[in-house]
Image: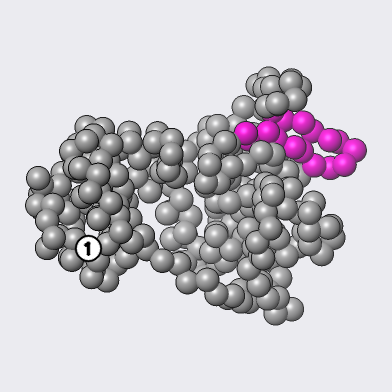
Amino acid sequence: MSCSSGEPGFEEFLKTREKRRRVLISETIAYHKSFFKKYLESKALSEDLVNYVVSHPNKWLRNVFRHYTQYLYYLRRIPSETYGWLMEVVTSRSYKLDVRPYPISLEEVKKTMEFLREKHKLYYLVSRLMLEGGLRLSHALFLIETYNPREIVEMPRVGIKTTRLIILEDKGFCRYYVGLRSPQKPYEWAYFSIETQRLLEEYAGLSIDRNSIRKCAKRHKLIPPKHMRKVAWKLMIRIMPREVARFMQSRLGELKIMGQDTWTS
């Protein structure tokens, strides 16, 4: 049996399988497929291939191989003994659990926001959403693309109907129901200022390539987008209880220790 990324149901399997963690982000799906084509395409499923995957310097290949093994087992193309052996030998890529400081100064934050406000309003909007509400980059992009403020939604389990967007004029901020139910990174409510809401109205519906934002930050030596959420966390816990900050960032039920972010000013 040879490996093929052209399997008609493999991509759908990654998106919809129920018992294991699903792969929902299109960029991740594309990354899986590119990895498969580069390292596994047309190779025979054999012990030599298993040794090749296990010893490969890029540990992400293990995850791709494991996903494909699960797919083959789902289709009953490999017996349970083979499946069990493959999953035992090809372990998932490991994550080193360490405490890393992120030395981000308020001056860096100011520089980044001022540059984006002047040079790239769309990326400025993304950064504002992440900074004000602690959104992940993927959630900020999802919010912009699917923004529908007047849509009526019903809150799960409580039966309350409301518009997605609630503007609290007297408080100076808005609350928007995102309602992402992903098992990996769910997101309930996004909080942002009224000024950001007005900017959001200008760019609603746009699809944004996350890599272009990362490249822009790297090219101009700005704060990487993934660190904006960490900045938001540090700002939030200065003025509110951690439990409230966790709720705002949809870290519901989170008990693990946050990363150690270090301010240099």
Q: Residue at x 45, y 67 (%)?
A: 95
Residue 104, x across and y down, in percent: 64, 73
- Residue furthest to the front in view is 81
Q: Is 52 in front, or is 38?
A: 52
Q: Main secondary structure of the magenta part?
A: strand
Residue 169 covered by magenta stretch: yes
User: Which quadrant of the rendered structure holds the C terminus?
Assistant: bottom right
In the picture, residue 163 is in which quadrant?
Answer: top right
Q: How many numbered dots are placed on residues in this image?
A: 1
Q: Secondary structure at mark 1?
A: helix
User: Which quadrant of the rendered structure holds the N terminus?
Assistant: top left
Q: Is 193 in front, or is 61?
A: 61
Span colored in magenta: 163-179
Q: Disc 1 marks which amino acid?
A: Val
In the rendered image, which residue does mark 1 sit on? Answer: 53
Kindly tell me whether residue 12 is visible in this rendering. yes
Q: Is residue 56 above or below residue 199?
A: below
Asked if residue 88 lies left or right of residue 149, the reply is left
